[in-house]
Amino acid sequence: MAKQQIGLLFGGQSGEHEVSIRSAQAIARAFATEKNNARYQLHPFYIQKNGLWQSTDKAASVLSAGSPPSDSDDPVANTASRWTFPASAANVDVWFPVLHGPNGEDGTLQGLLQLMQVPYVGAGVLASSAGMDKIATKMMFAEAGLPQVPYIAVNRAEVWSNPCVFPELCDRIEKKLGYPCFVKPANLGSSVGIHKVRSRDELEAALDNAASFDRRLVVESGVEAREVECAVLGNDTPKVSVVGEITFDSDFYDYETKYTEGLSQVHIPADLPEAIARKIQEMAIQAFQAVDGSGISRVDFFYVESTGEVFINEINTLPGFTATSMYPMLWESSGVDFEDLVDRLVKLAIERHAPQSR
């Protein structure tokens, strides 16, 4: 039987470009195993920081080096070239996108792949865009009856406003949420632009900084809780992994803690009461279905040990996929190794996009 042609799409125009390359490296290694190599032929496609698509030797060299080439962010003289796809793109049977952050997991790329009418791994346009926007996600979770910490949605115009509106906004946040609270851009990942604040001065500065990243912001009440995560795999009848936990010594799980070796620790499975672990798994499936997820997602929760409460934090429809990322490690502990995981994701993509499912 002829091998299926897999288009591994990575890089992209976001601050998580380098993380995308590392995820793509791990996925490429999984496709190179004897079992997967007999089924699939992998074609790497690299989207430079300036939006240009590269394939064949150049994409392969980026995978090999593990870092973007020096010309990745050079301005594009002819903007039309951003829409000139490599000729080999026409031969792809299934796309495997692994672009994290804006322009990769926010529905924009998924819409393009949808127009190509070729199956692709992961969430569709709705789940991707909703999962990327923390405010939209929270509204969907609320509709599904999933418990969340108190929050306030804010837009940039309220922050960068006249001297009367901004103080009223801060008053409203203090009255409803108090301190500490967290200020977050609604549409960024990897803890970029997130601040834990404990005073009016810190709140004002955090709102101003977060507004420089995004026009939509969310402010959440701070809780003393353990941060636990659960992986989801499937389409209409999704399965869940064991529950994992991330511990750290810093004030919160910020960008430096997340990406600096040794500053955080992963515990799989998490040391949780059986009833709590089961509740988290059930809530993960509810969250996945609430956004109409497909293929892959990681769902993050707060577990308040003192009260036994579980709050949903967010869903990530295209989580990190390196060998040491939480998503593949959760499935490894659940009996699905990395090699089998990428195979299952391809099969789920084909199932999701089959003519009879439309």
Image (spheres, rainbow, N blue to C red):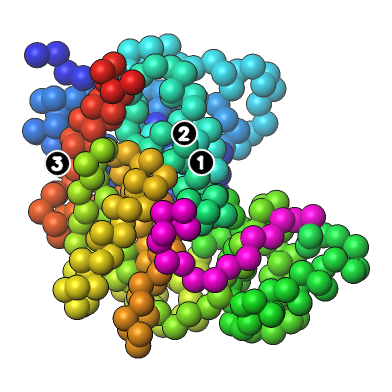
Residue type at mark 3?
Asp
As displayed, is residue 256 above or below residue 348? Answer: below
- The disc, 3 or 2, on the residue closer to the chain's N-terminal end is 2
- Quadrant location, the N terminus: top left
**Mark 1–mark 2 CB contact (< 8 Å):** yes
Dot placed on the residue nearer the N-terminal end, 1 or 3: 1
Q: Which mark is residue 215?
A: none
Q: Position of residue 308 (x, y in %)?
A: 32, 81
- The part of the image, by quadrant, that contains residue 235 is top left
Give the magenta range: 141-157
Task: Say what secondary structure mark 3 lies in.
Answer: helix
Estimate how packed mark 1 is, as few (under 14), some (14 to 19) or many (20 or more) residues with alpha carbons within 10 Å: many
Instruction: Say which of 351 and 83 sits in front.
Output: 351
Relative to 86, say whether 206 is above or below.
below
| Left-right relation of 178 to 68 | right
Tell me the tag on residue 125.
Answer: 2
Q: State the residue position of label 1.
A: 129
Relative horizontal placement of residue 107, taking residue 349 as reference (left or right): right
Nearer the observer: mark 1 or 3; the answer is 1
Task: Tell which residue pokes out farthest to the right in this image.
Answer: 163
Q: Is residue 143 covered in magenta?
A: yes
Residue at the spot x=25%, y=25% of the render?
350
Q: Is residue 66 visible?
A: no
Residue 249 location (% of width, % of height)? 41, 82
Judging by the rendered image, the residue that carries numbered circle 3 is 340
Rounded to the nearest angstrom, the CA distance separating label 1 from label 3 is: 27 Å
Q: Amino acid at mark 1?
A: Ser
User: Callout 2, which amino acid?
Assistant: Val
SS class of the residue under badge 2? helix
